[in-house]
């Protein structure tokens, strides 16, 4: 993808559905003995992988008039797949589905692309083993491919987890739905709570408050339709683009504003960003808003470990804001970034340096010396096949003195099909 220097951004953007909520909507609906209609489902590569996996387990899923219809049949009616379950690049699919598959009565194998098969899986395998799952992973249970021999006698447990990860929590909750006895989870920091909200919406006996979640299995889930709000992590790219370009003004409607996902907006406001949140409402147990953004003069910020899980997907684009902010931005306690689709600390630092950002790599984060008159360099940069790196580099490239070519940019379809179209639409001529 080639990006040229831009003057300003103006207009209304259509941000596609939330990736985390889309995955959960199709997985949890398949566990219900009834049909669920999902509106505004995100048809991105990752979520399509989740649909493929459920199809291989015998769940019928159709796309009709842009909506997704899940003919849920309950885990007892899933069938043994006769192929490897390929999750592609999707960490959410492999981790949440491992929890589901642990409670079946058949064998299954989950595998993905080279990035997925090198990401940490011990974090889900260990707790699932403790619940009685028969699950094995490569390299001493630390990596995929993962082999699961379903066990319909799982036991609920109390977990004090070492990592704050919504994927790990959700994997345990999927197993806990079909286990005997209560499951409690305590995480070191708050992670996103879409699974809890959706299970509650469907009638599960679940309580959650910050770092604590408790699920008592046994209650029948009741089918209800779902509307997937716009993905705030996708909106983030255009919020920052609007802030950093002069004379810019954009509006995005129907964006999910879950408090476990929206802290980066607080950060940008603290940095001086003019962002107006309007029209707040609740749709299927998730807060939804409209977001209006104006060009702003930004100041630097320091971000510490306790805030990281809430902004984990937005750190690459926050680094773009930091590049034009006055002063030194420091991000600490973010080593989890090293285990994403790429080692995001390395990817950001190495490629931002190529575009002349004054950035320093730390073991657990980065330090960026911002410049209010920043002009990005030009040339070739690499996304390392990581969608959020590709999109962050595209926004940084809008400040280029010339032209920036982003290698391996098709990976943007992992989470945000239509990114390029949206960008073209709002770029002022
Ligand atoms: C996700 C949780 C986050 C996030 C990922 C999606 C989810 O990962 O980075 O993009 O849908 O649960 P962790 O929970 O592993 O940090």
Image: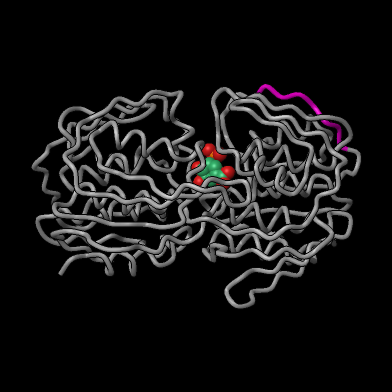
Of all residues, the one furthest to the bottom in this rendering is 65
Residue 51 seen in the current view: yes
**Colour setting:** one colour
Out of 229 and 369, give the one closest to the viewer.
229
Residue 293, percent from left and from top: 28, 49
**Residue 394 to residue 213: above or below:** below
**Residue 147 to residue 359: above or below:** below
- Quarter location, residue 364: top left
- Quarter location, residue 12: bottom left
| Quadrant, the C terminus | bottom left
Is residue 326 one of those drawn in magenta? no
Identified at 42% across, 30% down, the residue is 334
Residue 143, percent from left and from top: 62, 42
Identified at 85% across, 50% down, the residue is 104
Identified at 70% across, 50% down, the residue is 97
Is residue 156 one of those drawn in magenta? yes
Q: Which residues are magenta?
A: 154-160
Count of residue discs: 0
| Quadrant, the N terminus | bottom left
Residue 118 seen in the current view: no
Ligand 1 rendered quadrant? top right
Left or right for 46, reference 103: left
Identified at 68% across, 30% down, the residue is 213
**Residue 188 to residue 382: above or below:** above
Residue 307, percent from left and from top: 44, 28
Out of 359 and 173, give the one closest to the viewer.
173
Residue 297, percent from left and from top: 16, 39
Out of 187 and 242, give the one closest to the viewer.
242
């Amino acid at each position: 993808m080639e990006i040229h220097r831009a003057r300003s951004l103006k207009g209304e953007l259509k941000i596609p559905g939330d990736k985390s909520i889309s995955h959960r909507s199709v997985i949890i609906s398949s566990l219900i003995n009834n049909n669920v209609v999902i509106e505004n489902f995100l048809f991105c590569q990752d979520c399509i992988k989740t649909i493929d996996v459920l199809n291989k387990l015998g769940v019928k899923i159709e796309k009709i008039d842009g909506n997704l219809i899940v003919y849920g049949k309950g885990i007892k009616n899933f069938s043994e797949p006769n192929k490897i379950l390929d999750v592609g690049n999707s960490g959410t699919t492999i981790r949440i589905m491992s929890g589901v598959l642990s409670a079946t009565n058949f064998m299954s194998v989950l595998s993905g692309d080279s990035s997925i098969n090198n990401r940490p899986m011990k974090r889900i395998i260990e707790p699932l083993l403790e619940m009685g799952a028969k699950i094995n992973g490569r390299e001493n249970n630390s990596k995929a491919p993962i082999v699961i021999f379903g066990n319909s006698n799982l036991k609920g447990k109390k977990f004090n987890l070492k990592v704050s990860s919504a994927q790990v929590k959700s994997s345990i909750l999927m197993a806990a739905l079909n286990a005997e006895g209560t499951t409690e989870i305590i995480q070191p920091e708050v992670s996103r709570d879409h699974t809890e909200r959706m299970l509650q919406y469907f009638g599960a006996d679940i309580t959650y408050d910050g770092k604590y979640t408790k699920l008592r299995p046994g209650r029948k889930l009741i089918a209800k339709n779902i509307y997937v709000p716009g993905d705030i992590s996708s909106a983030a790219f255009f919020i920052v683009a609007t802030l950093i370009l002069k004379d810019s003004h954009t509006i995005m409607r129907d964006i999910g504003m879950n408090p476990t996902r929206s802290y980066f907006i607080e950060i940008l406001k603290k940095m001086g960003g003019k962002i107006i949140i309007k029209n707040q409402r609740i749709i299927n147990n998730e807060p939804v808003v409209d977001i209006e953004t104006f060009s702003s003069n930004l100041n630097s910020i320091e971000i510490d470990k306790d805030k990281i899980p809430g902004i984990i997907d937005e750190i690459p684009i926050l680094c773009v804001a930091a590049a034009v902010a006055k002063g030194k931005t420091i991000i600490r306690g973010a080593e989890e970034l090293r285990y994403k689709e790429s080692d995001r600390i390395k990817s950001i630092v190495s490629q931002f340096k190529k575009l002349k950002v004054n950035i320093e790599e730390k073991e657990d984060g980065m330090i960026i010396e911002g410049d209010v008159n920043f002009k990005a360099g030009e040339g070739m940069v690499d996304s390392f096949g990581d969608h959020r790196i590709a999109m962050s580099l595209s926004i940084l490239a809008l400040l280029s003195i010339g032209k920036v070519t982003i290698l391996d940019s098709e990976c943007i379809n992992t989470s945000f099909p239509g990114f390029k179209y949206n960008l073209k639409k709002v770029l002022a001529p």
